[in-house]
Image: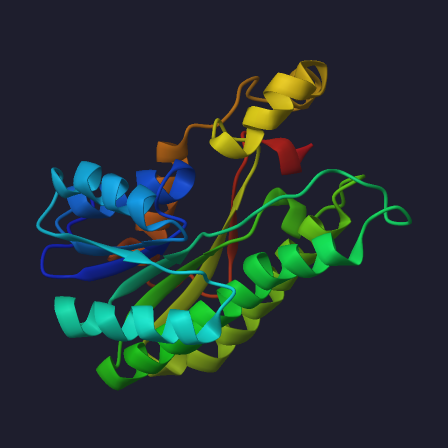
Amino acid sequence: MTENFAGKVALVTGAASGLGLATAKAFAEAGAAVAMLDLDEESIARAASVAQSSGPRCLPIACDVSDESAVRDAIARTVHELGRLDMAFNNAGIMVDRADTAEASGEDFDRVVAVNLRGVWSCMKYELQQMVRQGSGAIVNCSSIGGVAGGPGLGAYHAAKHGVMGLTKTAGLEYAAKGIRVNAVLPGVFDTSMNDSLEEEQPEMLEKIKAEVPIGRLGKPEEVAAAVLFLCGPGASMIIGHGLAVDGGFLAR
């Protein structure tokens, strides 16, 4: 099914690269205007110019999702300049160096939670306020296979991604009767910049991870984009509070 979002407005965080950029481009190709948010002003401007060629309008907004007031202002600007907000992909996230729980730093833990969990909460808060005023909308949060499983050395990341699933299920229940659907995607291991350092510093670990994926390869960002658009589209009208694994079979083992 090819989604048609002509006349709709989407918002994507972490949109300068990777899963976010691929999803912004997919929304644009489906006819939506897209607000593209990321931390660095120059990077998101370049990304928006790339995505712009695929659709009606891509609006770049520099925004730190760990700053609630910045998120509020970014969503207000989206509505002011693009007219409404129909869909959102809350994708912005970070990782820090691996460390077992007893050796991990509090600063790293707080930083990961601020972006990966509180950032999703802040985005949902203001997206939902706008969607309630409209009486409709669809939100997809980016969790992870780490949102339903553990991972040695990645305690903060997995804790935050578990939290994203809790937010997704709770908001899904709260807003279903108001015409708003909230779901999540759970990506596995993808070919994005988040794995660049692993490939450079510990290529043997990356090969081991790939070997554990039943499909036998890394995912492509466009494969997550397709799942996000499906969850935002009419074909997913009965799907609420769900975490859709896009993981090459990893969680099915």
On the picture, is 144 further left or further right than 205?
A: left
**Closer to us: 215 or 88:** 88
Above-or-below relation of 47 to 140: above
**Closer to us: 244 or 46:** 46
At 69% from the left and 61% from the top, the residue drawn is 110
Quadrant in which the C terminus appears: top right
Above-or-below relation of 188 to 150: above
**Closer to us: 18 or 44:** 44
- Residue 7, quarter of picture: bottom left
On the picture, is 84 further left or further right than 152?
A: left
- Residue 130, quarter of picture: bottom left
Q: Position of residue 206 (x, y in %)?
A: 65, 20
At 27% from the left and 75% from the top, the residue drawn is 76
Above-or-below relation of 31 to 68: above
Above-or-below relation of 2 to 137: above
Q: Position of residue 169 (x, y in %)?
A: 55, 68
How many marks are shown on the rendered structure?
0
Q: Judge whether residue 168 can be spotted in this image.
A: no
Colour mapping? rainbow
At 66% from the left and 46% from the top, the residue drawn is 146
Quadrant in which the N terminus appears: top left
Q: Position of residue 72 (x, y in %)?
A: 37, 75
At 23% from the left and 67% from the top, the residue drawn is 78
Q: Position of residue 138 (x, y in %)?
A: 33, 65
Q: Judge whether residue 56 can be spotted in this image.
A: yes
- Residue 152, quarter of picture: top right
